[in-house]
Amino acid sequence: MRKLTETELQAIKDRLSSLYIAYCEIYDELLDHYITALEQVSSEEFKTKKEALDEEFAWSVVKKMEKELLKTAWKEIGIASKSSYKLWSLGVKKIGGLIVALLALSFTFHLFGPDYFYALAVGSYGGIIILILFFNRKNLNLTWSIAPDKHKPKKVLVTALTSISVLVFNLIHFLAILLPKILVNSPYEDFSAIIYLALGAVIFAFTWTIYNAINLKSFKLIKK
């Protein structure tokens, strides 16, 4: 086994960069695979072996790997979502915190009404999303540029969770705007308060799911 030269390492990285790999996990795995395989051959055989690897991990193969990894990420998020509602397994501190939060929400609803209750739900949810984006900004590799040379792989779990969070928020907020307008001047206009209450509760429930899907100490997604 030999150590690859800087030129050889750069050739590998250039190849992987040309594939515009979406996720860090795949990029790191392929980089390790290339290096391990190419360290087994001489410098004279480097080009031939690398071309064989390039053919083995063609663009279509990598895109298939990305789809499979994303499916795995959704499964992990699903597991975290289900476990977040197993109250008996949360521990005394989390259960206590949840009770305090529920009491505060009940007080808010009765004191300020459904509109403010929904606004509070939106605010707390938005705060969680902002924290996700801020503390995972490196994993997300956020950039305003669409230039190909600015592309960087992202962490799949963080990316998937952020995507579903934005999707759920937009859907719920759309319903919160649309449904009360539909009910105006109708016999069911009084149901607007119930809609705000229900949608606000859904947002709080989803915020609770996100909270339990993230290790808030390090802000890394829990994989188990």
Image: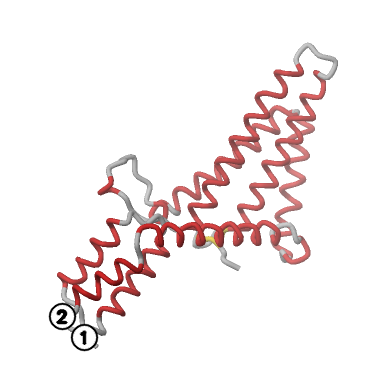
The residue sitting at the right extreme is 187
Disc on the earlier residue, 2 or 1: 1
Front residue of this view, candidates 154 and 11: 11
* Residue 14 visible in rendering: yes
Q: Position of residue 118 (x, y in %)?
A: 68, 33
98 vs 208, nearest the viewer: 208
Q: Looking at this view, is 205 or 26 the one in front?
A: 26
Task: State the image coordinates of residue 217 (x, y, percent, origin top left).
Answer: 53, 62
Judge depth for marks 2 and 1 and give the one in front. Answer: 2
Residue 152 in the image, given as x and y percentages of width and height: 33, 53
Q: Position of residue 27 (x, y in %)?
A: 36, 64
Q: Residue at position x 25%, y 69% from top?
A: 51
Q: Amino acid at mark 1?
A: Arg
As displayed, is residue 37 above or below residue 192? below
Q: Are marks 2 and 1 in contact (CB under 8 Å)?
A: yes
Q: Quadrant of residue 97?
A: bottom right
Q: Amino acid at mark 2?
A: Ser
Residue name at image x 51 percent, y 61 percent: 68
Q: Secondary structure at mark 1?
A: loop
Query: Compared with residue 21, is residue 6 higher up or lower down, i.e. above or below?
Result: below
Badge 1: few (under 14), some or many (20 or more) residues near its Cα, within 10 Å?
A: few
- In the picture, the disc for residue 2 is 1
Q: Is residue 7 above or below residue 69?
A: below
Q: Is residue 121 left or right of residue 134?
A: right
On the question of residue 215 being in view, the answer is no
- Which residue is the site of mark 2? 43
- The residues bearing labels 2 and 1 have C-alpha atoms spaced at a distance of 9 Å
Residue at 74% across, 64% down: 92
Residue 107 image-quadrant placement: top right
